[in-house]
Amino acid sequence: MAGRGEFDLIAELFAPLATDPAALGLLDDGAVLPAGTDDLVVVKDALVEGVHFLADDPPATVAQKALRVNLSDLAAMGARATHYLVALVRPARIDDAWLDAMVVGLNADQATYGVSLLGGDTVATPGPLVLSVTALGRVPPGAALTRAGAGPGEDVWVSGTLGDAAMGLAVLRGGWAPPEDDAAALVNRYRLPQPRLALGEALRGVATACQDVSDGLVQDLGHIARHSAVAITVEASALPLSDAARDAPDARTKALTGGDDYELAFTAPLDRRLQIGGLARALALPLTRIGRTATGGGVVVLDAAGAPLSLDQCGWSHGWN
């Protein structure tokens, strides 16, 4: 189908409907509504079979991924996750055994992340399986992180490691065959992202802008660059790679554009480096400086010699053209 791409669709059709200031102009991962002593953060993402997961992925991990990608959006806004709703769009081949296994996965994640189900919907479809989750979280009034707070002359940071999920998908599709233990670790990163909720909460008042890496680092940093009106320079040699992924074909390209990592990318003033180092130690989570902001716009990636890298794509976009 020819027509608008994903971000044009949002900007041209849906943003004009988002007249309440709580919607933040549809420019962030969620909406922020006043709710008594806290602000309520509301996020929504859907997973489609064949697009976000494979048809033979285990039911438990499919459900967990659907929940966790939404929890990652809450993390990017500094929210404490509390509840969720789920809509199951179910083809006829999804039987009771599949559903039982799905609920086992959700039950495990409820215990892990301290959330509970509020409701949802189930409908039949002749098309692929879809799981759509709406997640709710809370932040102190006015404390939500957004993409719009970065200024020039700040550090750009990222949590964890990058590119693992894209390489895990390559393993599942038969495009790469690393050692068995490495393959299992990478596939696990694709199927079971780790929402950085504790980090998101800790970054309130520390980070100036934040975004989770869902569609590819370069593309997602582009949201911060655009909405903060800054330029971002990324040093490819600084990207954190896992031991399992380090020797993969095009490892750094996948780290830059592969997506599905669900790590947090954020900006912060230079004088907060020691504070961020303390957060990394307290959370036992690597936090790596990968670049800087400046006046201007856009995202540029530099190679080890300081020359701009040319990328075939910046990340994933749900386009219709």
Image (cartoon, rainbow, N blue to C red):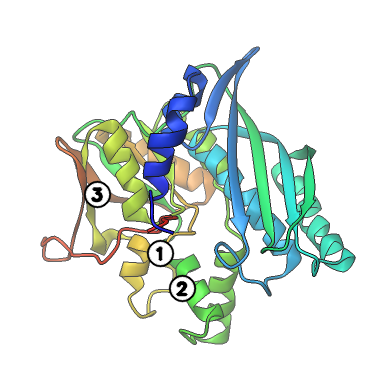
Q: Nearer the viewer, mark 3 or mark 1?
A: 1
> In the shown orientation, is residue 127 left or right of residue 176?
right
What separation in Å lies between label 3 and label 2 (alpha carbons)? Answer: 23 Å
Residue occupying image coordinates x 41% and y 33%: 27
What separation in Å lies between label 2 and label 1 (alpha carbons)? Answer: 8 Å
SS at mark 2 in the image: helix
Residue topped by disc 1: 258
Task: From this view, report whether residue 264 is shown above or below residue 252.
Answer: above
Residue topped by disc 2: 167
What separation in Å lies between label 3 and label 1 (alpha carbons)? Answer: 18 Å
Q: Closer to the camera, 37 or 13?
A: 13
> In the shown orientation, is residue 71 left or right of residue 143?
right
Amino acid carrying label 3: it is Gly
Residue occupying image coordinates x 65% and y 12%: 36
> In the shown orientation, is residue 233 left or right of residue 45?
left
Residue occupying image coordinates x 11% and y 60%: 306
Q: Closer to the camera, 231 or 47?
A: 47
Q: Residues within 10 Å of mark 1 (few under 14, many from 20)?
A: many
Q: Quadrant of residue 102?
A: bottom right
Q: Position of residue 257 (x, y in %)?
A: 35, 62
Residue topped by disc 3: 291
Q: Residues within 10 Å of mark 3 (few under 14, many from 20)?
A: many
Q: Earlier in the sequence, mark 2 or mark 1?
A: 2
